[in-house]
Image (tube, rainbow, N blue to C red):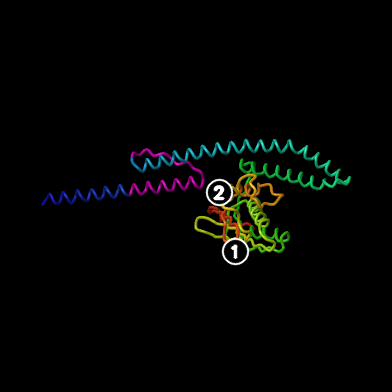
Amino acid sequence: MRWYLFVILGMGAAVILLAGLLLRREKRIAGLRAALDDYLKSGKPLPYSLEEDELALLQNGLSELISRLELEKRRAKDADRKNARFAADVSHQLKTPLAGLRLYCELDAQNGNPNAEKELRLIEKTERLVAELLKLQKIRADSFDFVFEAAALEGLTEETFAAFRPLYPQKHFEVTGAAVLRCDRAWLSEAISNIVKNACEHTPENGRIQAQIVNGGESVTLTFEDNGGGVPQAELPHLFERFYKAKNASPDSTGLGLAITKAIVSKHHGTLTAENAEEGLRLTLIFPKTDANEKIHT
């Protein structure tokens, strides 16, 4: 009967060993998950594992992938800084000749030149294009300080709508839903303004612009939808590119407003997408939630 006892003891030891291995594996998986969360939230690099198993291969593969991603991000940031410096140089060099042209056009207007008003509008558009291009490149190059604080997203959106109502009195603006978002109020307001301005320009006189806020478990979603008929499907992937203007764009458009909006959203670690809805265009902004969303600054 002793051999039964040895078998039972051996099986018990095997079960305990297996349980220990499973528990250790679960702890390592939990640690890997926590390390990935740290990277996503704070950029903390994923450490390499010295173990020799499949889980270690997975962790080291992820660590290598993250290292390459960070390298590409640094390279992209360096390129953005070079572009920002170039845009700043171009802006500086253009200011003097544009000011001179404006002076001559104003003199022509005083002397009754019928083309002077058109020339002044072209100069103003050029000045606005240069300023917006410089702003876009500076945002991408982190040349501006973003001051983040918790704010009521519905309040920011309603403030933007209130600014556009006097300009478009026949249009209908509506905000539904509520959420608190950690953001830079001024910059996010500018991003929202660009979206609303674009919607106002592409909807009929009595058009409709609706904003819907959804407070999810891990993210906050802000969706804008209008009844302007949308854009051709082939144009959707290009809406956020620099200088891209849809076929029905306003003649005064610089093609930079939505590109600036996307850059601002990216600085909030969010995403911006476009799609055609039933009656018009739908733009969706998704922002990650943070623990800093507890106190509201209004």
> Residue 243 is drawn in which quadrant?
top right
Q: Which residue is mark 1?
A: 176
Instruction: Estimate the x, y position of residue 3 in percent, counting from the top left.
Output: 12, 49
Farthest residue toward the left?
1
Label 1 Cα neighbours within 10 Å, binned few <14 / some 14-19 / many ≥20: some
Instruction: Estimate the x, y position of residue 204 in percent, counting from the top left.
Output: 68, 61
Query: Tag 2 or tag 1, which sits nearer the N-term?
Result: 1
- Residue 93 on the magenta segment: no
Residue type (three-letter) at the residue carrying disc 1: Thr
Residue type (three-letter) at the residue carrying disc 2: His
Residue 268 lies, with reference to residue 57, above or below; the image says below
> Residue 137 is drawn in which quadrant?
top right
Q: Nearer the viewer, residue 229 or 172?
A: 229
- Residue 34 on the magenta segment: yes
Query: Which segment did they paint magenta?
Result: 23-52
- Using the image, tell me which numbered label, if any, was put on residue 269: 2
